[in-house]
Image (cartoon, helix red, strand yellow):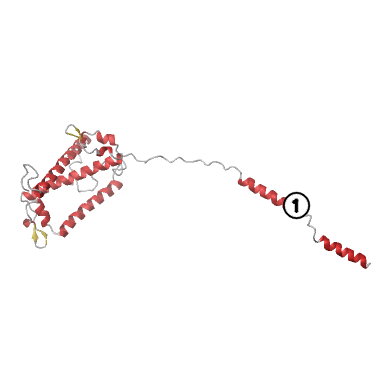
Amino acid sequence: MKFLAIISLAFSSAVAFVPGTLAPAHSARIIRMSDEALSEVEAPIEDEEIVPVPEGPTYTCVSKSSIMAEPNTLEFGGVWDPLGLADIGSDETLAWYRHAEVKHGRVAMAAFVGWWAVGAGLRLPGELSHGLDFASIPSKGIGAWDATPGWGKAQMLLFAGLIEFHDELFHSRRSENGHYLRGGTPGKNMCPGVYDPIGLSARRSEEDLARGRSAEIKNGRLAMIGIAGMWFAATVPGSVPFQPDC
């Protein structure tokens, strides 16, 4: 009896070291789950619809060809572009050139008139600054600028900068066709009250306005040459033939 009990205990202890019968089934289930996960990963992904992105800008700038075809582009029977600047850059570059030309022409016309007004003895009433009357300013252009106090020069430069800032701001926000580099008209004044303050151009036709813009560009070019000539005549005596001392 003791012998049978010892044999049964030994047999039961040996069974403890035999792998269980559930292990293969469990391993098969893990392998099957891995295959399913792998099949989900390798499943083809449906192509999403790609929305095409428009190439280039969405605005229409004034083209280079249209600017070069304008009558006011011609001077002395041909295109006045000795440095070939029209061939540099894009349509936006030439639109910026045209806008800068018109603005510099306007400034040059104002400077030309102001230079001769001071030379003719015209003065504003009152004082330019404390202890300095307008009447005491020299009659020559360079001397008049030199006699202006530093704060007066700073005020003039600040005023010019404000006009430039508002002009760019109004071109972006109030122009019918947008900024002059984004489809607007180069050279169009957008700062209210600075150009044509009494509204002389309000009743003019579009053809008349076009002729006026062409005349403005040509007069501005002459004014830039004229003010440059007076500057050289004042700073380098005898550099400009037939130019009086101014």
Residue highlighted by disc 1:
25
| Residue at the extreme right of the image, as rendered | 1
Along the horizontal axis of the image, is 188 left or right of 139?
A: right
Taking depth in this image into account, of 211 and 140 the one nearest to the observer is 140
Q: Amino acid at mark 1?
A: Ala
Regarding residue 8, the answer to whether it shows in the image is: yes
Residue 83 in which image quadrant: top left
The residue shown at (75%, 55%) is 23
> Which quadrant, please, contains the N terminus?
bottom right
Along the horizontal axis of the image, is 211 left or right of 57?
A: left
Taking depth in this image into account, of 240 and 73 the one nearest to the observer is 240
Residue 6 in which image quadrant: bottom right
Regarding residue 188, the answer to whether it shows in the image is: no
Taking depth in this image into account, of 31 and 160 the one nearest to the observer is 31
Above or below, comparing residue 190 to residue 204 in the picture:
below
Q: Mark 1 Cα within 10 Å, few/some/many (few <14, many 20+)?
A: few
Along the horizontal axis of the image, is 133 left or right of 61?
A: left
Q: Position of residue 182 (x, y in %)?
A: 32, 42
Residue 134 in which image quadrant: bottom left
Q: Position of residue 117 (x, y in %)?
A: 8, 48
Q: Position of residue 92 (x, y in %)?
A: 30, 41
The number of numbered badges drawn on the structure is: 1
| Residue at the extreme top of the image, as rendered | 77
Q: Secondary structure at mark 1?
A: helix
Taking depth in this image into account, of 2 and 78 the one nearest to the observer is 2
